[in-house]
Image (tube, rainbow, N blue to C red):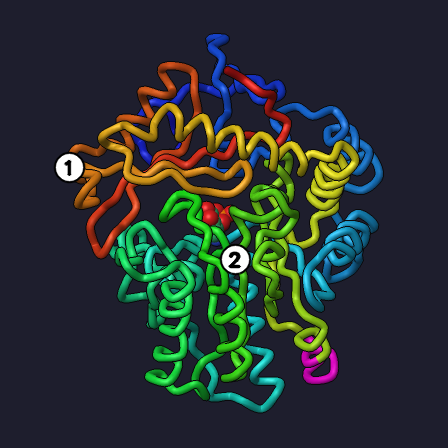
Amino acid sequence: MTHVFHRNPQVELPVAARGEGPYIYDAAGKQYLDASGGAAVSCLGHSNAYVANAMKQQIDQISFAHSGFFTNQPMEDLADFLIERAPGDLDHVYFVSGGSEAVEAALKLARQYFLEKGEASRTRFISRRQSYHGNTIGALAAGGNQWRREPYAPLLMSVPLISPCYEYREKPTGETEWDFGQRVAGELETALIEAGPENICAFICEPVVGATMGAVPAVEGYFKRIREICDQYGILFIADEVMCGMGRTGSLFAIEQEDVAPDILVTAKGLGAGYQPIGAMLVSQEIFAAIVNGSGFFQHGHTYMGHPVSCAAALAVQQYIEENDLLSNVRRRGALLAEALTARLGNNPFVGDIRGRGLFQGVELVADRMTKEPLDPSLKIHARIKSAAMAAGLMCYPMGGTIDGRRGDHILLAPPFIVEEWH
Ligand code: PLP
């Protein structure tokens, strides 16, 4: 009998007792290969001594000092580290405790930016179907995951949703990849005109879609067109890299591979690699200046923002990745993983698609490869795969996504960047 309110109280979970490298051990000593990093979090694996030392040193010095009274050195150093490597003119970093908080901050900052500029009519956001931006009320509203939204729909702001750049399901045969990307990006312009551009603050999307689709990158040219439309109508582009950022796709920021820069970039999971809860919002010089030269105050905040131990842990994680050139490993091992998945599952009658970037790979399951008919949701295949994998000592991240209201199952793999080659 447990007094913990677990998210799924019907499932009895093993106790995670110890971690080492890519493995977690339960209280009975059973080993699990962490091939999903939880949910794309544990990019360094477990019990990394360099990170543990940095956290210990920070706790010995100062474990907490409220950000309304003090800054702290690890927060300053982590901001420098990120900005020195960030795309475009992203110039300042706002630290929070996780992904949903980072998205909430981004939505509110976008709104406040336009208020500072005297464009008070801009209150709305546009996003995409089959997207996920977090579970708090604002972030949930900004996402297009019908299943997660449904119970709370009456509480959520209304957000026009455009098609995702989801080649496997949205591109008809006969249409070129380029034309497909331009067409679905063009839906942003249509949605903007319908809602009135003067009412829109920002467009938010994931550069590589994680939880709702299973590692789906956009086709070439898509993000360039998105950037053009945002500029043309004066709205902000928010890149949600909570899951796909911090090296997961082979570059520190996933959007770098699209050769465009967002106005706001949010990141979390891999930033602290699970050693501490932390999220970050990177903002452009122009947005920062609008606040500084306007009201002078961002009207938003949380108690634990810029927590010294979280920042020290995240800084150590990022330094470790860079000093050990782990992003090369992400690219090399990612290519091997994609090859192995194709070799072993490519002909499976229930595998419709295998896609991804770096160590962020997804396998989409279907009932019929020809028609792409999703599996019957009542079979709960994703839940069965998860428990069968756990029984076999493997952590993977199977999800039942939503395809036009129906569920489509996929398995997400996001192993730590330290993984070795295996056969
Ligand atoms: N944004 C994206 C793209 C995510 O994948 C997630 C979580 O999976 C979130 C936001 C929310 O992050 P968190 O669970 O840390 O609040």
Q: Is residue 296 magenta?
A: yes
Task: Indicate the secondary structure of the residue bearing disc 2.
Answer: strand
Lateral position of residue 184 relative to residue 271, left or right: left
Q: Amino acid at mark 1?
A: Ser
Q: Is residue 381 above or below residue 259?
A: above
Are discs 2 and 1 less than 8 Å apart at CB?
no
The numbered mark at residue 378 is: 1
**Ligand 1 has an atom within 8 Å of the beta carbon of the residue at disc 1:** no
Q: Is residue 296 left or right of residue 355?
A: right
In magenta stretch: residue 213: no
Is residue 137 visible in the rendered image? The answer is: no
Q: Furthest-bottom residue in view? A: 118
Instruction: Classify 120 as above or below 140.
Output: below
Residue 93: x %, y % from top left: 70, 60
Is residue 81 or residue 330 the one in the foreground?
330
Q: Is residue 394 left or right of residue 302?
A: left
Image coords of residue 201 (percent x, y): 49, 78
Q: Secondary structure at mark 1?
A: helix
Residue at 59% of width from left, 36% of height from top?
A: 274
Amino acid at circle 2 = Asp
Mark 2 residue's CB less than 8 Å from ligand 1? yes
Mark 2 sits on what residue? 240
Q: Dot 1 surroundings within 10 Å: few (below 14), some, or many (20 or more)?
A: few
- Residue 335: image x %, image y %? 54, 34
Q: Can residue 360 be seen here? A: yes
- Report the magenta residues as a range: 290-297
